[in-house]
Image (spheres, rainbow, N blue to C red):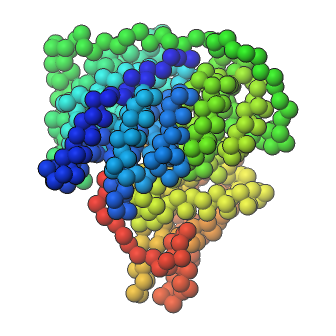
Amino acid sequence: MRAPRNGFSSVADIDEFVAVLDQYQSGEMDADTFRGFRLTRGVYGQRQPDVQMIRVKVVGGLLTSEQLLALADVSTDQSRGFGHITTRQAIQFHFIKLDDCEALQRRLGEAGLTTREACGNTVRNVTADPLSGIVADEAFDVLPYAEWCQHHLLRDPRFGKLPRKFKIAFSGNEQDRAQAAINDLGFVARIVDGQQGFRVLVGGGLSTSPANAYVLHDFIPTSEMPVVAEAVTQIFDRIGNRANRARARLKYAIKKLGFEAFKVEYESVLAEIKALHPEALVMPPTSRETDQLPERAHIEAQSPLGSFDVWQEHNVLAQKHPGFKAVVVRLLLGDLTAAQFRGLASLCATYTDGTLRTTNDQNVVLPWVEARLLPNVHRALTDLGIGRSHARTLVDLTSCPGADSCNLAYTGSRELGRELVQILEANESRSSVRAALNGDIKISGCPNSCGQHHVAAIGFHGGIRRVGERVLPLYELHLGGKLDHEGARFGRRIGKVPARLAGEALLGLVGLYEAERNANESVADFFWRVDEALVKAIVDPLNDVADDAPDLMFQDLGTEDVFGVHRGDGECAS
């Protein structure tokens, strides 16, 4: 347990935002200049005019009950009644009026939350293993290091105008639950000869050109983390491509320079920093963990609901602390209503250490739940509408916002997500669906991989195809991707299916897995090695759509409108 460091907000940030907004609205500042500013304050344009998406940093995924109440207020007062957890543990709100941004930021700021540098060419939300400090398989608790890193780099004028966004992640063990292998800079906790430290990874990323990170250091002691983080961020500022935004990420800079040349540059910068500023790069003590909760009133255990056993099988994790469990709350598409934010705030205050964690698969984790009180928590979650079982299985899918709000999206990835969940749940008795529960599904509305389709056992990304005079919304399949101790493996691109037939394709794929898998072979490993012809035999016939096909085929999921491409300038790609 820890006393969270909630000092990420700043009243001065908000005052400055209000002043700059006034300049823009009075005509003293042009739209392009204001756009560059507002992006660094977490304010993105949507495909709908005159409304914004606001992203809130949630460092390491850690939220307190007080912060959950602030998020609930924002959901109700400035947004559309709910918030959305991203694949980088942040919270997004959509359809925000510019004139409401001040009230939103001030309410969040009261709880220690900030939108500063949640977007734009900055150091984005620093993520961490959502099970940090909880589970026995971690090398050590990495959350304090993620918090320090964010505090140190936030508002640093050197890093507020980087060549492109810069992402940092901290994983607690070699299984890489924080996805360090697809970040610009990743720290993976290790213990070597009794010493705590990190494997350091650089240059990972997804989007249209996925790249597995390079190993910069196989091991550094934890005391070296601050200077390494500073050095890599400085190098990116120096060598990143400022002329071509599409080739500006660190992975492209390393590829152009060559990794060996990059390491030479890195060692030079590292030496400069150590010589000039050693005192500025020392972390405070990180021992903030204890083995028991603060004293609280005794709570009587309730009788379990009928669905409790299945929920407990899939959603409850063992903690390394005897008598306590961690609960994974499975959310639908990462959404939480205002009432659910408030309900989780109450649950945290009553049953956890006062905190929860957001996850990079768009769920939340409730730590420090007494094992005997699991029925109480399950009942409370069920009353809130978030007592779903089968967390971290095939039915617990991930999706980007898609055409619901994003300018870059071709298709409504969220609508496909809803469709696939409904199909899987309606067919849960099928042996093929039960067999494939070990897999995962990730969906993006375009190739940019905000939904991380490249690293899913079954990934979908939205696209289009012209059929005569009409446009067909479709999804391209990426099969066999995963992230583990060996790094990132990007799925094979095999086939395309119309959006309206994606569910049929999914059932065909899980049927193929059941019929052709080897003993103990995972969904991801099966689709990595299976004969491509077997997959194409399922999906290619579905893609054979003639120009006289029914109108329904030319409508995206969730709409009755004739499909058309409505893409604009994207501000929030991955």
Which quarter of the picture shows residue 259? top left
Q: On the rendered structure, is 131 left or right of 20? A: right
Q: On the rendered structure, is 279 left or right of 408? A: left
Q: Position of residue 386 (x, y in %)?
A: 67, 44
Q: On the rendered structure, is 529 left or right of 294? A: left
Which quarter of the picture shows residue 349? top right
Q: Residue at x 50, y 86 (%)?
A: 546
Nearer to me, 392 or 219: 392
Q: Position of residue 242 (x, y in %)?
A: 16, 46
Q: Residue at x 31, y 19 (%)?
A: 226
Q: Position of residue 56 (x, y in %)?
A: 41, 39
Q: Is residue 131 visible?
A: no
Nearer to me, 119 or 455: 119
Q: Position of residue 31 (x, y in %)?
A: 19, 54
Q: Is residue 148 visible?
A: yes
Nearer to me, 20 or 197: 20
Please determine whether, in this image, residue 361 is positioned above or below residue 367.
Answer: below
